[in-house]
Image: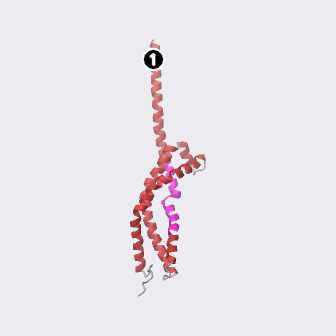
């Protein structure tokens, strides 16, 4: 009888320890996934972060401005070029500030995607520059969740439009002070 009680006690102890181990292992695994996911997001930002985004956006911002300035035939080519430079700079600076302010939120959302939807082994594989099936999965998952992750940024950009327009107006005033009038002189 004593032997049966000891076996039961040993079995109960083993079961309780075994039940506790997965929870501890899961917590440890979640912490490790979080640390690995943060490394992946940092690596992604290194290659496709705000600076790179702004460089890509700068060209797309400048093209419509140049198109609009073509109709300003009263300006010389040099003045139109200068106007495009100044206005693109003003927009880029404003958008850069918005991106800098929003990137922590975007990074947190990307980190959550990796922690919640990838294993530690997959995250480490992604960190090795997407050269695996896990890397392809990361691109698919991020692409699926990108609209949701970018939504706060797009809303913030819309909310910032009056301020950005103010920056452009200041840039136009600055150009006017340099003698570059974007509007043709009024006929007298």
Residue at image location 46% in from the left, 67% down from the top: 92
Please tell me how crowded label 1 is: few (under 14), some (14-19), or many (20+) other residues with Cα within 10 Å.
few
Rendered view: 177 above or below 52:
below
Magenta stretch secondary structure, dominant: helix
Of all residues, the one furthest to the top in this rendering is 1
Q: Of 76 and 50, which appears nearest the observer? A: 76
**Residue 37 visible, this orientation:** yes
The percent coordinates of residue 121 (x first, y second) are: 55, 43
Rendered view: 109 above or below 95: above
Residue pictured at 49% horizontal, 72% vertical: 65
Q: Quadrant of the N terminus?
A: top left
Q: Is residue 12 above or below residue 180?
A: above
* Residue situated furthest front in the rendering: 188
- Where residue 171 appears, as percent x and y from the top left, is 42, 73
| Residue at far bottom of view | 188
**Residue at image coords 44%, 64%:** 95
The span shown in magenta is 37-62
Quadrant, the C terminus: bottom left
Q: Pointer 1: what residue? A: 6
Please name the residue shown 48% across and 33% down the image: 22
Residue 106 or residue 165, whichever sits in front: 165
């Amino acid at each position: 009888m004593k032997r049966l009680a000891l076996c039961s006690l040993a079995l109960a102890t083993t079961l309780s320890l075994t039940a506790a181990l997965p929870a501890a292992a899961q917590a440890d695994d979640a912490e490790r996934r979080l640390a690995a996911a943060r490394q992946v997001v940092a690596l992604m930002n290194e290659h496709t972060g705000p600076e790179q985004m702004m460089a890509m956006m700068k060209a797309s911002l400048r093209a419509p401005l140049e198109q609009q300035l073509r109709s300003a035939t009263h300006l010389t080519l040099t003045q139109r070029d200068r106007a495009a430079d100044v206005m693109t700079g003003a927009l880029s600076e404003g958008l850069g500030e918005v991106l800098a302010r929003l990137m922590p939120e975007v990074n947190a959302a990307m980190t959550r995607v990796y922690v919640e939807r990838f294993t530690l082994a997959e995250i480490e594989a992604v960190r090795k520059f997407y050269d695996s099936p896990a890397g392809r999965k990361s691109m698919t998952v991020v692409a699926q969740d990108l609209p949701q992750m970018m939504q706060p940024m797009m809303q913030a950009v819309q909310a910032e439009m009056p301020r950005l327009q103010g920056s452009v107006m200041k840039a136009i005033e600055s150009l006017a002070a340099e003698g570059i009038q974007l509007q043709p002189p009024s006929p007298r």
